[in-house]
Image (cartoon, rainbow, N blue to C red):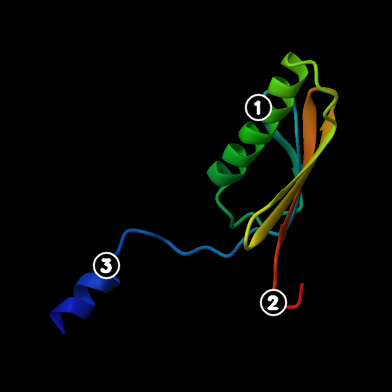
Amino acid sequence: MGLLNFLSKAGAEVLRLPSGSLTVDRQGNIIASTISSSYPSAVLKDVSADVLKLFREARAAQLSLTELHIHFASLQITARELRGGAIIFLTPKTVAS
């Protein structure tokens, strides 16, 4: 029984994958979002910062990148560049898809 008590006190929190979209400005501030407010905003800010970084690096390398698609095993991220900001779509993958 002691092992079960130890495992139940794990610090990691299991979250549902986000579903929806968010619009961010040049600085990565979230302007609008259809993702549940119960989802941690820190995670969404990290995603938006990484997407904006990709667009900035492409621009610095003189690549014409206006849209990107990132496919993970359980999550798909689609982003479109909007004059320095971006609109980001987060779609969890299900067994059916």
- At label 2, counting other C-alpha atoms closer than 10 Å, the crowd grade (few under 14, some 14-19, many 20 or more) is few
For the C terminus, give its image quadrant. bottom right
Q: Secondary structure at mark 1?
A: helix
Residue under the image location 30 percent in, 64 percent down: 10
Q: Of callouts 3 and 1, which one flags the residue occurring earlier in the amino acid sequence? A: 3
Query: Which circle's residue, 1 or 2, is located before the other in the chain?
Result: 1
Secondary structure under badge 2?
A: loop
Mark carried by residue 95: 2
Dot 2 or dot 3: first in sequence order is: 3
* Residue drawn 59% across the image and 55% down it: 39
- Give the camera-side residue of 8 and 94: 94
Residue pointed to by mark 3: 9
On-image quarter of the N terminus = bottom left
- Viewer-closest of 9 and 89: 89
Give how far across and how far down residue 12 sits, in percent: 37, 59
**C-alpha separation, residue under disc 3 versus residue under disc 1:** 36 Å
Which of the 4 quarters of the picture holds residue 22?
top right
Nearer the observer, 83 or 66:
66
Q: Which residue is mark 1?
A: 53
Q: Residue at x 28, y 73 (%)?
A: 8
Give how far across and how far down residue 47 sits, in percent. Answer: 62, 41
CA separation in Å, label 1 and label 2:
31 Å
Disc 2 and disc 3: Cα gap in Å?
30 Å
Which amino acid, mark 1?
Answer: Lys
Q: Residues within 10 Å of mark 3 (few under 14, many from 20)?
A: few
